Amino acid sequence: MSKTKERIGTSVANGVSPQQTVAGPVAPPRVSARRRRPGVIALSLALIAAGGAGVAVLLLQVGNRTPVVTVVRDVQVGQVLTEQDLGKASVALDPAVKAVRADDLKAVVGKRAAVELKPGSLLSPSQVTKDSLVKPGERLVPIGLKPDQVPATALVPGQRVQLVQVPAQGAVAAVEEAGDGALPETIAGRVVKASTAAPGTGVVVVDVATAAEDGPTAAAWASTDTLRLLLDAPGGR
């Protein structure tokens, strides 16, 4: 028997096939190196920087909050402010927004509301006044306006108006026959307050301050429904 046959026989006898004895060592799998993507890295760095900047801005806003005075319940025009009408809050205040600081709350108590105040709003210095809305030498005349007599422009406190006497129903023909071209009588006034339209009728009540001597005349015109309200141009021109 040859040496080759002897080796094969010995391998088979030991339970090892000839192929296993011939095969060499198995090479490990090649692992390719991960490619670096500069764009992805740059985007990640940008997101991290943006997140840090956002946190910095948030912390800055939280740290720059200003204590201010707020309105906690409805206050009508001309009503005297009390401590129960006001509250305090800490807000991030824009420099363009003018608000009464919380330290000045006592200073506004006792003043009058120059405009209607609503709960949840910040109180600004221009919304309060120490003066009475009806000044000495004036009278307050309430005027009811029907829906077709209410101006489309909102009536606001301080607005200058003219109260005009118009002919009563049935007297229009007499005025036309007279034809004297006389201008209607007018009374200068100032809006103090205007109500919302009444449910069902739509009537708006406007409180108008007039000169003391003109008050009775304006009230008489209003009672006979011969009064109309005209708005003056800004500046009274």
Image: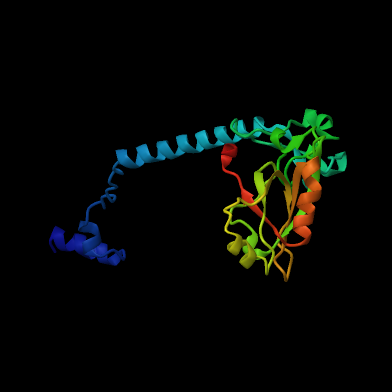
Q: Nearer the viewer, residue 160 or 11?
A: 160
Q: Check the image and report above or below for 33 versus 177.
A: above
- Residue drawn at x 57%, y 40% as measured from the top left: 234
Q: Check the image and report above or below for 62 versus 200.
A: above
- Residue drawn at x 73%, y 34% as measured from the top left: 68
Residue 73 visible somewhere in the drawing: no
Q: From the top left corner, tell me how far across and down residue 30 is, in percent.
A: 27, 48
Q: From the top left corner, tell me how far across and down residue 67 is, in percent.
A: 73, 33
Position of the N terminus, as image quadrant, is bottom left
Q: Nearer the viewer, residue 25 or 110?
A: 110
Q: Nearer the viewer, residue 187 or 11?
A: 187
206 with respect to 39 (left or right): right
Residue most toward the left? Answer: 2
Q: From the top left corner, tell me how far across and down residue 203 is, in percent.
A: 72, 63
Picture quarter containing residue 95?
Answer: top right
Question: Which color scheme does this rendered protein use?
Answer: rainbow
Q: Nearer the viewer, residue 182 or 71?
A: 182
Picture quarter containing residue 214?
Answer: top right
